[in-house]
Image (cartoon, rainbow, N blue to C red):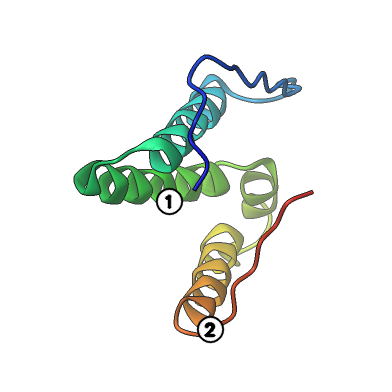
């Protein structure tokens, strides 16, 4: 495995127009959690931060423009359905030998 270079920075710029302050905080938190997950040597931190990242991602999906915009005029719980669909898909891949690497 490659050693991490802690003296390097990755600058991510996101157009935050139309985002709430809470959405912005969730995105910042997710980025911090992802950094912690990929760089930790601690099992406890690895599991806790992974759980926290998934929880924060779910919160962000539930607060998305689509979920809140559609919710006003429709009884379908789109955010919950999108999350369930995603979790089902991830769970299917967890227990197969299929490994996907997404690197664009």
Relative side of 70 to 45, left or right: right
> Compared with residue 48, is residue 80 higher up or lower down, i.e. above or below?
below
Residue 25 disc label: none
Callout 1: few (<14), some (14-19), or many (20+) C-alpha neighbours within 10 Å? some
Residue 87: x and y, percent? 49, 69
Residue 54 disc label: 1
Classify mark 2: helix, strand or loop: loop
For the point 56% across and 48% down, the residue is 61
Callout 2: few (<14), some (14-19), or many (20+) C-alpha neighbours within 10 Å? few
Which is nearer the N-term, disc 2 or disc 1? 1
Relative side of 96 to 51, left or right: right
For the point 47% across and 50% down, the residue is 58
> Compared with residue 31, is residue 53 higher up or lower down, i.e. above or below?
below
* 2 vs 1, front mark: 2
Q: Are marks 2 and 1 in contact (CB under 8 Å)?
A: no
For the point 48% across and 20% down, the residue is 6
Residue 35: x and y, percent? 47, 33
Residue 3: x and y, percent? 48, 35
For the point 65% across and 25% down, the residue is 19
Distance CA(mark 2)–CA(mark 1): 22 Å
Between 26 and 100, the residue placed more toward the observer is 100
Residue named by callout 2: 97
Relative side of 44 to 36, left or right: left
Residue lying farthest to the right in this orientation = 104
> Compared with residue 1, is residue 101 higher up or lower down, i.e. above or below?
below
Residue 2: x and y, percent? 52, 41
């Amino acid at each position: 495995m490659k050693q991490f270079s802690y003296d390097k920075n990755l600058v991510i710029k996101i157009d935050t127009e139309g985002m709430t302050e809470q959405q912005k905080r969730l995105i910042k938190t997710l980025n911090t959690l992802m950094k912690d997950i990929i760089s930790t040597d601690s099992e406890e931190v690895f599991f806790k931060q992974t759980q926290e990242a998934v929880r924060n991602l779910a919160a962000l999906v539930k607060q998305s423009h689509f979920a809140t915009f559609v919710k006003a005029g429709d009884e379908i719980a789109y955010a919950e359905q999108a999350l369930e669909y995603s979790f089902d898909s991830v769970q299917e891949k967890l227990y197969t030998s299929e490994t996907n690497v997404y690197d664009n």
